[in-house]
Amino acid sequence: MIDHRAYDSEHGDPVVVLVITGTHDVSRIVHLLSRGLCEHITVAQRLVQQIRRHNAGRAALKLLAAHGGPDFTERDPGT
């Protein structure tokens, strides 16, 4: 499930929040971002680091790898 919210910060900057729930949806967003522009790849790398800290997140990364996506289950050097 994907939920989203958009609002202005206290300084008037735009803020967008994506709430992605479920193993399949999490693995899909990681895969999508990891194949994007360099800015997307940086976001994907940070997201993967955060996801790896949780059991369900690691399950989502394993699902992605099992279905032909990139394997983000191993820690990157320096993370």
Image (tube, rainbow, N blue to C red):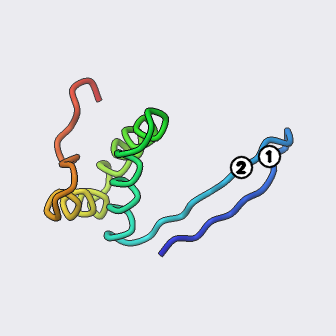
In this rendering, is residue 58 above or below 38?
below
In this rendering, is residue 10 above or below 78?
below
Q: Residue at x 20, y 64 (%)?
A: 63
- Judging by the rendered image, the residue that carries numbered circle 1 is 9
Residue 53: image x %, image y %? 32, 49
On screen, residue 69 versus residue 21, left or right, reads left
Q: Residue at x 23, y 60 (%)?
A: 64
Front-most of residues 58 and 35: 35
On screen, residue 19 versus residue 17, left or right, reads left
Quarter of the figure with the C terminus: top left
Q: Residue at x 29, y 49 (%)?
A: 52
Residue 33: image x %, image y %? 41, 48
The residues tagged by marks 1 and 2 sit, at their Cα atoms, a distance apart of: 6 Å
In this rendering, is residue 19 above or below 31?
below
User: Is label 1 in a helix, a strand or a loop?
Assistant: loop
User: Is label 2 in a helix, a strand or a loop?
Assistant: strand
Q: Residues within 10 Å of mark 1 (few under 14, many from 20)?
A: few
Q: Residue at x 46, y 41 (%)?
A: 40
Q: Earlier in the sequence, mark 1 or mark 2?
A: 1
CB-based contact (under 8 Å), mark 1 and mark 2: yes
Mark 1 is on which residue type? Ser
Residue 8: image x %, image y %? 81, 50
On screen, residue 39 versus residue 71, left or right, reads right
Mark 2 is on which residue type? Val
Residue 34, numbered circle: none
Residue 35: image x %, image y %? 35, 46
Front-most of residues 16 and 34: 34
- Judging by the rendered image, the residue that carries numbered circle 2 is 15
In this rendering, is residue 2 above or below 37?
below
On screen, residue 58 versus residue 66, left or right, reads right
Q: Quadrant of residue 75?
A: top left
